[in-house]
Image (cartoon, rainbow, N blue to C red):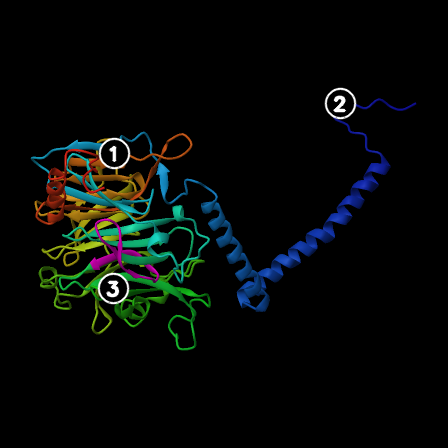
Amino acid sequence: MSEELQVGQVAVSPTRSVEGASWIGRLLPIVGIGLLAFLFGMVTAIKQSPPFYAVRDAWLAFCSLSEQQGIMSSQWPKYLWYPAEGQPQGLVENNPAESYGDYTSFVSGDQCSATLVDREGQEIHRWVAPFKNVFPNSRHVPQWIPEQFILMRRGLVYPNGDLLALYETIANTPSGCGLAKLDLAGNVLWAYDDYAHHDVSIGDDGRIYVLVHELRQLTSKDTELNPLTDLPLVEDCVAILSPEGKETKRISLLDALVASPYYRPMLIHVDRYGDITHNNTVHVVDADFAAHYPEMKSGDLMVCLRNLNLVAVVNPESEKIVWATTGAWEHPHDPDPLPNGNIMIFNNFLAHGVEHGSGVVEFDPRKWRKEWYYTGNGAHHLRSDTRSCQQSLDNGNVLITEGDRGRILEVNRAGQTVWEYVHPVRGGEQGDLIPLVCGARRFTREELPFVEQLKLKTRQAPLSGEVAAVGK
């Protein structure tokens, strides 16, 4: 007759005890093997013995392929489309008495095109030029990349209506796709088939300065870079082109950095893409800005090495960095040299006390001081983690491109919005996505005489039959 169990007691049979011990006995060797494998992996990684490279390279390739497939699996790919957050569409604010200029051009992520709107937000003209129409047999952009993953990153408008169009992709590394000059109708005048990316500028003499990059495998000669990594690096360069699009010179910014007194190996971060500098800007320094700095001269090139938070000036003849500064910014874009010697720059990762988001700062490198800062007004704070830029206007106002929110606004120095335009296109299954705006620029009528010629041509068109919209 078995005894009745008291509360809190558990009956354990001898058979179950043996089974439990047997299960633990089988588990211990597995745990031991796993621990040994972990320790072996640590030693292999620390000493970087041959198995380490095989596993590492395979893992990096897997991560890159997974990210690429994730981006390309969507009809509305990230980095090109962002939550619209209930934003209005088209013109939001227009104060002609306070605003400067007449026309605004911009490029965006919804298609390979550049758009010109007037002060009222009405479209004046659009240059539509899909990448594969401009570069049908590109030698470096994989044919399997769909058109929707290639965007026009910059679109510089000439006074006669020609457009300098810079293409890049979000689906490949390197991301640069090419540079082309188009006429008013979008026809190709010439094409520069290389890894052109991020930014392009035109000198007073018509020469063109464009960023290019490519993968570079380090050799035994790269004594300063070899200790950092054995992975291929993304080498940033500036290519100098003739007005006809022929390359005349190429300057390696990576080599210029390593040879400069500003190079600090301990500060270099190498990600899995091998991207050390991530240059996103090239501007031609004019005589007014250069006059404030004895190291510079008119015609030097200002670049922005985003991953180092470094703004540098390169002499195109010597190919050396002659001046550089950090400042009140984190992962910035588009440093503009101003006539007063200051720099105006888009600060993407603003983080100071309780502030967070993005901002535009005018910074004096000589005094190491912020002269002006804008982070938004009212309930709308600037927030753009990627891209974005600004333009200092002749009346003192600033035109700001808040890229990730598809928004362009003009503010005065008191921080008041005097003109605002939000991209009117929406995407996504619920129509809740907005395409990014990569960059915008303001023009006066005098700067773009072709617009008045277009209007005149339209007014003179016959009244019978169809009459095309202006510039379309």
Label at residue 7: 2
Residue plotted at (89% across, 24% down): 2
Q: Earlier in the sequence, mark 1 or mark 2?
A: 2
**From the image, which quarter does the C terminus lie in?**
top left
Q: Residues within 10 Å of mark 1 (few under 14, many from 20)?
A: few
Q: Nearer the viewer, residue 384 or 65?
A: 65
Q: Relative to residue 404, is residue 88 depicted above or below?
A: above
Which span is picked out in magenta?
A: 181-201
Q: Position of residue 363 (x, y in %)?
A: 17, 52
Residue topped by disc 1: 380
Q: Position of residue 243 (x, y in %)?
A: 20, 64
Residue 179 visible to the viewer: yes
Label at residue 417: none
Residue plotted at (10% across, 56% down): 339
Q: Earlier in the sequence, mark 3 or mark 1?
A: 3
**From the image, which quarter does the N terminus lie in?**
top right
| Cα separation between marks 3 and 1 | 42 Å
Q: Could you tell me the amino acid type at mark 1?
A: His
In this view, the mark in front (1 or 2): 1
Q: Nearer the viewer, residue 209 or 277?
A: 209
Q: Could you tell me the amino acid type at mark 3?
A: Gly
**Horizontal relation, residue 276 to residue 335: left or right:** right
Residue topped by disc 3: 245
Q: Earlier in the sequence, mark 2 or mark 3?
A: 2
| Cα separation between marks 1 and 2 | 64 Å
**In magenta segment, residue 199:** yes
